[in-house]
Image (cartoon, coloured by chain):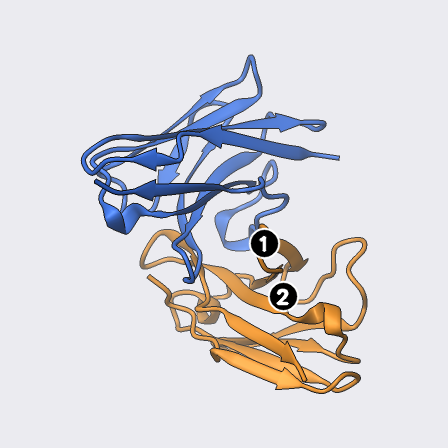
Amino acid sequence: QVQLQQWGAGLLKPSETLSLTCAVYGGSFSGYYWSWIRQPPGKGLEWIGEINHSGSTNYNPSLKSRVTISVDTSKNQFSLKLSSVTAADTAVYYCARARAPGAVAGKSWFDPWGQGTLVTVSS
Amino acid sequence: QSVLTQPPSVSGAPGQRVTISCTGSSSNIGAGYDVHWYQQLPGTAPKLLIYGNSNRPSGVPDRFSGSKSGTSASLAITGLQAEDEADYYCQSYDSSLSSYVFGTGTKVTVL
């Protein structure tokens, strides 16, 4: 059974770079796409981007200019960097498994999810 | 940006049936992209409830069912139980945005 465990800094100042990492345990890493999703306090979910084991990425156009997702296949880990953060980036950030091998985005869901990391941006 | 619209809240007594709608457009649900549903209990990560419009993952009770028609989808919960009190989100893909998209979320309250 696949499990995702994530970690990273929880308190940032405006203009700093958010950095989170997600490790995948107990299942295949190759072939799948792996995503980051965020949820501001009391609000809904927003997809940030995805990466596969080859390093191919897709980003939400609304965040693309500030987002970098990378992968370390030797450790079965993938990471998120979001630059120039503001208070609007305060949210719980989740990692999740996305597209299965051969699947298209239009038919893909997120399962399982990491436990979530609250990132607060405050001066 | 939530391009899928859900009612903010629905409620029902134990044992009743409730439905949650998810309304999209011709660039997402109406384009033929699948709809998936998630349950989020307070303080926890979302959990996949329905995938591919109407399929239940192993372990999800058959009280939960999904359907899709045109530019909308629905989640039905029959035999409502206290443990079903949670937030529910639909999810699809939008070709205009080139992005996965989520619904606005619906809070289910068991009276």
Between disc 1 and disc 2, whose residue precedes?
1
The residue at 80%/84% (across/down) is: B15
Q: Residue B36 has which mark? A: none
Residue type indicated by callout 1: Pro
Q: Is residue A87 above or below residue B88?
A: above
Q: Give percent across and percent down for residue A82.
A: 30, 35
Please name whichever residue, A56 or B21, is drawn nearer the observer in this view of the structure: B21
Number of marks: 2
Report if residue A100 is visible in the image.
yes
Label 1 resides on the chain identified as B
Name the front one of labels 1 and 2: 1
- Where is mark 2, residue-wise? B53
Report the side of B18 relative to B61 (left or right): left
Q: Residues within 10 Å of mark 1 (few under 14, many from 20)?
A: many
Q: Chain A is drawn in which colour?
A: blue
Is label 1 on the same chain as label 2? yes
Q: How crowded is mark 2: few (under 14 residues within 10 Å), some or many (20 or more)?
A: many
Residue type indicated by callout 2: Asn
- Where is mark 1, residue-wise? B46
Among the chains pictured, the one given orange colouring is B
Q: Residue furthest top?
A: A74
Q: What element carries label 1?
A: loop
Please name whichever residue, B86 or B101, is drawn nearer the observer in this view of the structure: B86
Rendering quarter of residue B77: bottom right
Q: In this view, does A28 lie above or below B109?
A: above
Rendering quarter of residue A57: top left
Q: Give percent across and percent down for residue B48.
A: 64, 55
The residue at 80%/65% (across/down) is: B61
The residue at 57%/21% (across/down) is: A76
